[in-house]
Image (cartoon, grey):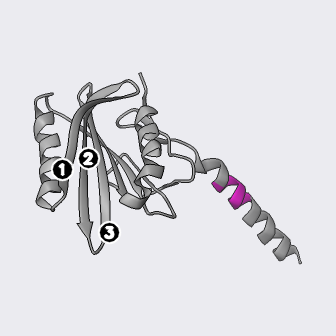
Amino acid sequence: MKSAHFVVITLFAFLVSAVAVAGEPVADEEFGVQIPPPDAWEVDADDDKAVANFKHPDSQSQIQVIGTQLMSEEVSDVFFGTFHDTLVESNFEEVGSEDASFGDFEGKKTTYEFSHSGVTLEVTVFEFLRDDTAWLAIGYMQDEHADEHIADYEAVVENISFDD
């Protein structure tokens, strides 16, 4: 009976701590950044290429934030260009590009689509510079979920905060 009581208390403590941590921002000391996940999205800690990666458990939509420190600001064109070239070479079709602002960040927003087997994936990329770091915020969403998740993507970008 004591072991059953212990298991119940342990399980309850785990559930409470998981709920408390679920909305905590992802913090990265190297970049001095905090990135909050949207409500109802899960943090994917297994993505070692991104500073933060969030997945929506029902739609499998994904929001990824990638930072890379640059040797100089001019190198950002190579970093951003290589990312976009990779999408195009993988048969993603660019459907729009414009200068954009999210919160305190000014940059360029580009939208892509990729269709395969009757499913269309919409990809939104916002690129911006901050000091000596180039940033990409990428939203991957099936077209049927894009309207409901684009506000979550925009909120992630708008609420990125840096330690000063």
Q: Residue at x 51, y 41 (%)?
A: 25
Residue type at numbered disc 2: Thr
Tell me, yes or no, whether the two marked residues, 1 and 2, touch with CB atoms within 8 Å: yes
Percent across and percent down for residue 76 are: 15, 35
Q: What kind of secondary structure does the magenta stretch mostly adopt?
A: helix
Q: Which residue is mark 1?
A: 94
CA–CA distance in space, label 1 to label 3: 17 Å
Is residue 65 at all visible to an observer of this figure?
yes
Q: Earlier in the sequence, mark 1 or mark 2?
A: 1
Percent across and percent down for residue 26 are: 47, 43
Judge by depth and name the residue closer to the eye, 3 or 110: 110
| Magenta-tinted stretch | 13-18
Tell me, yes or no, whether the two marked residues, 1 and 3, touch with CB atoms within 8 Å: no
Q: Residue at x 69, y 60 (%)?
A: 14
CA–CA distance in space, label 2 to label 3: 16 Å
What is the secondary structure assignment of the residue under circle 2? Answer: strand
Residue 14 among magenta residues: yes
**Quadrant assignment for the N terminus:** bottom right
Residue type at numbered disc 1: Glu
Judge by depth and name the residue closer to the eye, 105 or 33: 105
What is the secondary structure assignment of the residue under circle 1? Answer: strand
Q: Which residue is mark 2?
A: 111
Occupied quadrant, residue 10: bottom right
CA–CA distance in space, label 1 to label 2: 6 Å
Q: Residue at x 15, y 62 (%)?
A: 90
**Circle number at residue 112:** none
Residue 93 among magenta residues: no
Q: Which residue is mark 3?
A: 119
